[in-house]
Image (tube, rainbow, N blue to C red):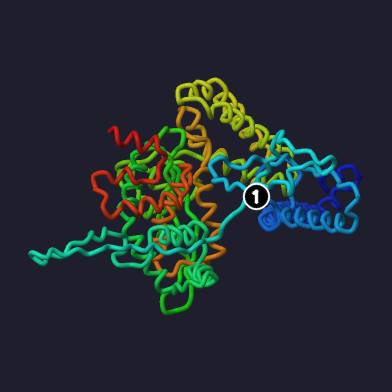
Amino acid sequence: MEISESLNKIKLDETARRQLEPLIQGLQTALENKDAELQQKDLKIQALMLELAHLRRIRYGKKQESLSSIQHDLFEESRLEDIAAVTEEAEQLAPSARRPKRDRAGRQPLPDHLPRIEHRHEPESCQCGQCGHKLVKIKEDVTEQLDVEPARFFVHRHIRPQYACKHCETVTAAAVPPAIIDGGMAATGLLAWVLVSKYLDHLPLYRLQHIAARHQVTLSRSTLAEWVGKTAVALEPLVDRLVWHMLQGNSLHADETPVQQLEPGRGKTRRAYLWVYRSNDLSGGPPIVVFNYQRSRSGAHARQFLGNWQGHLLVDDYAGYKQLFDKRRSETPCIECGCWAHVRRKFFDLHQATDSPMALEALTRIARLYQIETQGKPLDQQQRLALRQQHSVAELESLHDWLQATRLKTANGGTSAKALDYALKRWPSLIRYAQTGHLPIDNNPVENAIRPVALGKKNWLFAGSERAGQRAAAIQSLLGTARINGLNPAAWLKETLDKLPTWPNSRIDELLPLAPEFIDNMKNG
């Protein structure tokens, strides 16, 4: 109740009321200022709580956006190791004690494709130890153990006898076949091991040097670096064809991640960016991922890479992509598709920080959209379109109405308003997927492609130069594409390095790290 309303109930003469009027107005203004200040503080506290919860989740929690309140321990591996160690110590102290029941699933069968080395264990005697009669085999007890042989170095010794003609004194010998590195001592298997270790397992060359040293093999870092540089040049035609094939699709994912680049001569690093482009699995083409290393986050890099490509581009809300969708600035504008995972993340962070019922309702509604997508995953494009038209469109319309109504009741400036505004601002691009049968609901495939590189940065820390970053991007494009096609990257790379020196350029597509069915389609035209 305002001060003036309270004073109306008090009987005062007109003179006293006039004298008190300035004081009343001053107090009223002061109260309004205090209310505004408190509201600002509440919004600030809410924003800080959201930021704190987000940072705590990044630092301590498992990066999984689910509605479950149960957070798995970041040190789950250590906890399981401790349990195993304590159990083993207890069994050693009391070996006759009954072992506690282990809370785990049954042991999975070992893969059939692995070679088997049989070890037969016969009894010491073929006569019965009780009565002395001859034993008869009734069955076999077979158990299997998984083993591994660490990096094994061996030498290929090539012997080429030379033959001479006594009549004309001509000397004949088998020709030395072309190789990736002419006259080099590294076989293709060793080159593949170095590249996969460096770019897929993110092991710096000095660690590979130490691994070789444990086997009494001397490999200097300069030699390893020379092999990497020369092999990367040989693989460039494959990367170019990979980019060409990806740009034949009508829809793509795009994202970018920062990396550090060493500034030559200064001993300091600067920020560069690894741009990532991923084909759309729902479009039916071969799964391809391409990394593109650039010195900045300028949207010009994306425009340069895509060139005149036209289609649906699924991205986050980064401003660098906006010019690609602007008809006034681009002769061949792309069509923007929004990412529902980014929308969900806003409400997830809000719910984690404040237990907001509004955020929980938003997450529940978005979850229903994903449930429809799960049902449509095994369907073809026409069936998926029909499913989305029947169910997704209605869910999206209901969600939009709820977002608008909720926004009208939400104060400006808070984290709740920001989460709502993010969804409403991008709404046209967010619903675009439901109008087709081939567009994805989110940008998660490209984020999954980035994740191994982001984890690897903890090992290699920075790119040594711009050329080194471009080389890493090229090789990671090949190995990353092999991985998402279900190929063994090391086996594919070794086979490719064997074939590449004599392979005709007209058939270069057959060496690409794609699934066999896509290679067969290329062969058949």
Query: Percent position (x, y) of residue 336?
Result: 44, 40
Count up the numbered dots.
1
- Picture quarter with the C terminus: top left
For mark 1, does the 10 Å Cα neighbourhood hold few (<14), some (14 to 19), or many (20 or more) residues? few
Query: Percent position (x, y) of residue 354?
Result: 74, 47
Q: Is residue 303 visible?
A: yes
Give the camera-side residue of 160 and 231.
160
Which residue appears at 65% of the width and 36% of the height? 408
Q: Height in image: 357 above or below 17?
A: above
Give the camera-side residue of 216 and 270.
216
Q: Height in image: 319 above or below 184?
A: above
Which residue appears at 41% of the width and 58% of the height? 293
- Picture quarter with the N terminus: top right
**Residue pointed to by mark 1:** 63
Give the camera-side residue of 148 and 105.
148
Quarter of the rendering containing residue 515: top left
Which residue appears at 36% of the width and 65% of the height? 229
Task: Identify the element where label 1 is drawn.
Answer: loop
Which residue appears at 86% of the width and 46% of the height? 100
233 on left or right of 270:
left
Residue type at the position of mark 1? Lys
Query: Percent position (x, y) of residue 425?
Result: 53, 40
Q: Height in image: 111 above or below 49?
A: above
Give the camera-side residue of 159 and 61.
159
519 on left or right of 256:
left
Q: Is residue 45 visible?
A: no
Query: Percent position (x, y) of residue 151?
Result: 52, 61
